[in-house]
Image (spheres, rainbow, N blue to C red):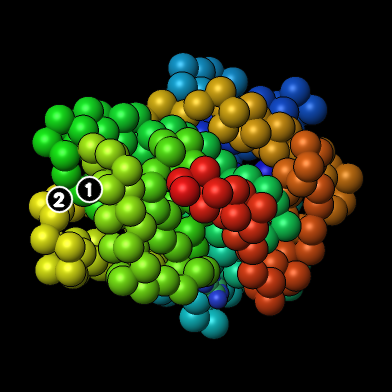
Amino acid sequence: MKRIGVLTSGGDAPGMNAAIRAVVRSAIYNGVEVYGIRRGYAGLLARDFVEMSLGSVGDIIHRGGTILRTARSEEFKTKEGMEKAVNNIKQLGIEGLVVIGGDGSFRGAAELAKRGVPTIGIPGTIDNDIPFTDYSIGFDTAVNTVVEAVNKIRDTATSHERTFIIEVMGRESGHIALYSGVACGAETILVPEKPYTIKGVCDKIMSGYKRGKLHSIIILAEGAGNAFEVGQKIKEMTGLETRVIVLGHLQRGGTPTAFDRILASQMGGKAVELLLNGVSDKMIGWVKGELVVTDLEKIFSAQKPLNEELYNLASVLAI
Ligand code: ADP
């Protein structure tokens, strides 16, 4: 294998740069050239390539975002788009492709593999909603970002004896909400995987106030309801002053945590190793402390379960 490509696709996540760095350095170490493809599959179609040197990935391990930038491309999903992508890859002499992204990006990678392009997926999304890996790159950083924000909110919540509803990202999953909620000692964690009633939430807040709690922190996953509606209903039912904060895109940015940098570095190195060994159409996961390789196809029909044990513990601790 003489030359491989690497791209980041879909939503960005802190730690993607560390993964790019690891792919580039591991490949060059093994005598393989690397082309960076800018703006994901859109750049693949537009032939937006750059040859990566050892120095091109210097000074990026600590930076959030992705130096290759990312994009979404509808054209790539079409038959013509896919053919164009395969032609561009072949013309450039790229013999293997590392795709750093989420579920959608992996579907694209699987389609390329079917057309004879060896591909390896690295899970990069703050949502942590990809099955067959305990963690995806960016999740740990996003959780830490939420925790820092909630620490600040807690100060003012206590002073004013207010109920705060803090909406966090996660699309249809509650992983960010659950992990950050436990780390913040939130009174209530609302996730799409678990049904809840506003009355149940209000009863819990009121019992807390009765035993002298000065404030209440509710962490709401974006897929579990509209924070402003939840806040309004709680106010109507309890008469308490509520405040709503939607943390939004600040969860996507920031310098990656050591955990994310190490995870990304290991996955990047492994991706190159797999391509060199002729492996294709797989995703690298991190399961119980070890790198695990899974068929891309298996990912599309599976769901990433919420950590039940942690969810149950959260309820116990927030009694
Ligand atoms: P993520 O990878 O974060 O889940 P998206 O779902 O937006 O992000 O997917 C990123 C890109 O992957 C899309 O813009 C598209 O180009 C490509 N993609 C998504 N789904 C498919 C599919 N079923 N077949 C081929 N390519 C796809």
Name the image quarter holding residue 28.
top right
Mark 2 surroundings within 10 Å by alpha-carbon count, few (fewer than 14), some (14 through 19), many (20 or more): some
The structure residue drawn at horizontal position 39% and vertical position 44%, both measured from the top left corner, is: 186
* Mark 1: amino acid: Phe
Residues at circles 2 and 1 in contact by the CB criterion of under 8 Å = yes
Residue assigned mark 2: 243
* Mark 2: amino acid: Arg
Q: Nearer the viewer, residue 66 or 42?
A: 66
Above or below: residue 77 compared with residue 144: below
Q: Which of 248 and 316 is in front in this view?
A: 316
Q: Is residue 194 left or right of residue 123?
A: left
Label 2 sits on a secondary structure element that is strand
Image coordinates of residue 122 in percent, x first then y, are 64, 48
Residue assigned mark 1: 164
Q: In this view, does 181 lie to the left or right of 87?
A: left
Q: Tell me if I can see residue 292 in this picture.
A: yes
Outermost bottom residue: 79
Above or below: residue 148 compared with residue 110: above
Q: Which of 191 and 133 is in front in this view?
A: 191
Q: Tell me if I can see residue 96 in this picture.
A: no
Label 1 sits on a secondary structure element that is strand
